[in-house]
Image: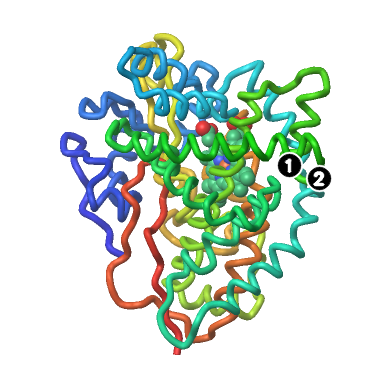
Amino acid sequence: MTVNAPVAPASLDLMSLEAVSDPHGYFAQLRESQPVYWDPRYRSWLITSHRHVAEALRDPRFSSDRIEPYIRKKLSGPDTDPLVRQAFEVLSGWMVFKEEPDHTRLRRLCMQAFTPQSIAKLRARAESLTAELLDAVRTPGEFDLIASVAAPLPSIVIAEMLGVPVEDRLDFEQWTAKVSPLVSTGLDDPTRYGSVAEGMASLVAYFGQLFKRYTEQPEDNLITALLRAREQDDALSEAELMATCTLMLFGGHETTANFIANGVLALLRHPAQLAAMREDRVDIKLALEEFMRYDGPGKTVVRVAREDFEFEGQHIRQGQRLFLILSVANRDPLAFEDAEQLKLDRPQSRHVGFGFGTHFCLGAPLARLEAGIAIPAIVKRWPDLALAPGPLQWLPFLGTRGMRELRLRTG
Ligand code: HEM
């Protein structure tokens, strides 16, 4: 792997090729010298050490609610495109952007679907789906692992969980793809809103139809369960129902695709551990946590300061934004021995790849289930699997660490 020369803070460019392709190397010096750093260019704090990221994640003075203030500040004028406003209003109902008491209420309503028992029921389906997707890959030759296996697996599983009928899947995926840059980047870029807003409007209209359908004819799926919750003591408003369905969709989709792809990439770059995985000499539970720590798909989460206060010797002002860079915290040598090395048998990792504290990823058991099935199945399927020649293209997103495609070859 290429490791960039450490960068002096004055020249930080979060979307540069270097930062996007190797965030671990790019931010290493900053993490050591100024783990809580005010970046004048982004007018945000960059938090990069494990200790500080973990502290910020559990500190209630940092708020997750950043969408409603944004709507009030930037999207309330008469010139605002109503579709753009609608897209942000849906987002503002996501539990991940909510605070007490709404956050707890929304999280509790969804928790049932993500208990270990509920997730275990999906195992057989996830296994057969993985096998089908692998069978459909045309080899020998070259193929894109993301398009053929890593992306469709979580996308089909979450669509089935929600109750999206098979015949609607293609439309559904196209709308989702349009909205995804909004969810993944984290930086303000109004140019991307047009297509995002269109995609969200289509999803909202489509989910509206599904709500009607499952109100009239309930089935065994997440939408029906949420509709029932809405009927019982008014626990969920129509807007929250819409928000929760779209959150499940985005939460459960690209992140897990990148988890699988980044994990396979890590193995292909570490032949001894690849061999151990193929020969079942690996404890998959530990290995999954190490894939998350080493190069997990959750790169950054954002918080906003609720009040003025001192944090690690720095004066944080109310309303200031913080980027908590999870990927860089997960390679902090003060928190992990041999932090730069992939060690699939690393015991009890305290990585922050799924976040930490009240907003800890609700879908983590599902992501682990899918990646725990897919990663071993992919590397076992082709004993000569290798990276195809050519550079990897990392997505220029702040929130997500993922590749545009992962071209592999066999034969
Ligand atoms: C490897 C895959 C995944 C990664 C890396 C990931 C990462 C994260 C992170 C970092 C957070 C915390 C955000 C914050 O604190 O602001 C989060 C929250 C969340 N994730 Fe995931 N996630 C993944 C998969 C999933 C899946 C499969 C689902 C559901 C289908 C899901 C649903 C959620 C939800 C609902 C929340 C909000 C929880 C709350 O606010 O209480 N995630 N995820």
Ligand 1: give its quadrant.
top right
Residue at image position (50%, 21%) is 65
Quick one: which residue is furthest to the bottom in this view?
411
Residue 317 occupies quadrant: top left
409 in relation to 158, above or below: below
- Is disc 1 surrounded by few (<14), some (14 to 19) or many (20+) residues within 10 Å? many
- Is disc 2 surrounded by few (<14), some (14 to 19) or many (20+) residues within 10 Å? few
Distance between mark 2 and mark 1 Cα atoms: 9 Å
Is residue 126 or residue 58 the one in the foreground?
126
Is residue 342 or residue 109 the one in the foreground?
109
Q: Secondary structure at mark 2?
A: loop
Which residue in the protein does label 2 denote? 219
| Residue 54 visible in rendering | yes
As shown in the figure, which amino acid type bears the numbered disc 2?
A: Glu
Q: Secondary structure at mark 1?
A: helix
Residue at image position (66%, 76%) is 280
Q: How is the image coloured?
A: rainbow
Is residue 4 or residue 375 the one in the foreground?
375
Which residue in the protein does label 1 denote? 222
Residue at image position (60%, 79%) is 135
| Residue 350 visible in rendering | no
